[in-house]
Amino acid sequence: MIFSKACEYGIRSAIYIAQRSLNNERCNLKDISKEVGSPEAFTAKILQLLVKGNIVKSVKGPSGGFEVSVKELKKIKLIDIVLAIDGEIDEKKCVLGLKKCSEDHPCPVHSIYKHIKKDLLSMVHNTSLSEMSNSVEAGLTCLKI
């Protein structure tokens, strides 16, 4: 399970918006796009998906922008962002793209990847937007290198 480019930008956008929301600030499309390194038009489409998925809120008007409810930060998990952008995760999908990969007929990396996949699934289901935004806010992690 590797995230699509849109999902990568969506995760980074959600973290940036959450981080700003922790400081009682809203952010606009231009700032988000610049911060996550994504073209504005592409970022706008991603943000629409995040709004539709109830991850972020869009506020219209002169003091508008994007925000996340600070109360919801711990409830929003990485999987929610992935589902909003990439849709359902096919847990049975072969990492090499083989149609009939299974325990009975494994691909060359099946036995190695199944453990990695289990860890990845655990990560997306258990990691909250709060954890990710707080680690950026504390300077322990970064959104841009």
Image (cartoon, rainbow, N blue to C red):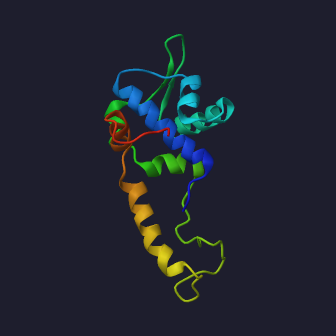
Give the answer, above or below, for where 117 lies relative to 74. Answer: below
User: Residue 114 placed where, x, y %?
Assistant: 47, 74
* Residue at far bottom of view: 104
User: Residue 94 placed where, x, y %?
Assistant: 59, 73
- Quarter of the rendering containing residue 105: bottom right
Depth check, front residue: 63 or 31: 31
Give the answer, above or below, for where 120 lies relative to 35. Answer: below
Residue at (31% x, 35% y) in the render: 138
- Looking at the rendered structure, the number of numbered marks drawn on it comes to 0
Residue at (34% x, 36% y) in the render: 139
Give the answer, above or below, for where 113 lies relative to 136. Answer: below
Give the answer, above or below, for where 114 lies relative to 134. Answer: below
Depth check, front residue: 29 or 91: 29
In screen coordinates, is 9 left or right of 77? right
* Residue at far front of view: 145
* Residue at far top of view: 62
User: Residue 23 placed where, x, y %?
Assistant: 35, 23
* Quadrant (top left/top right/bottom left/bottom right) for the N terminus: bottom right
Can residue 54 be seen by looking at this rendering?
A: no
Can residue 20 be seen by looking at this rendering?
A: yes
Residue at (39% x, 61% y) in the render: 122
Residue at (55% x, 46% y) in the render: 8
Depth check, front residue: 60 or 141: 141
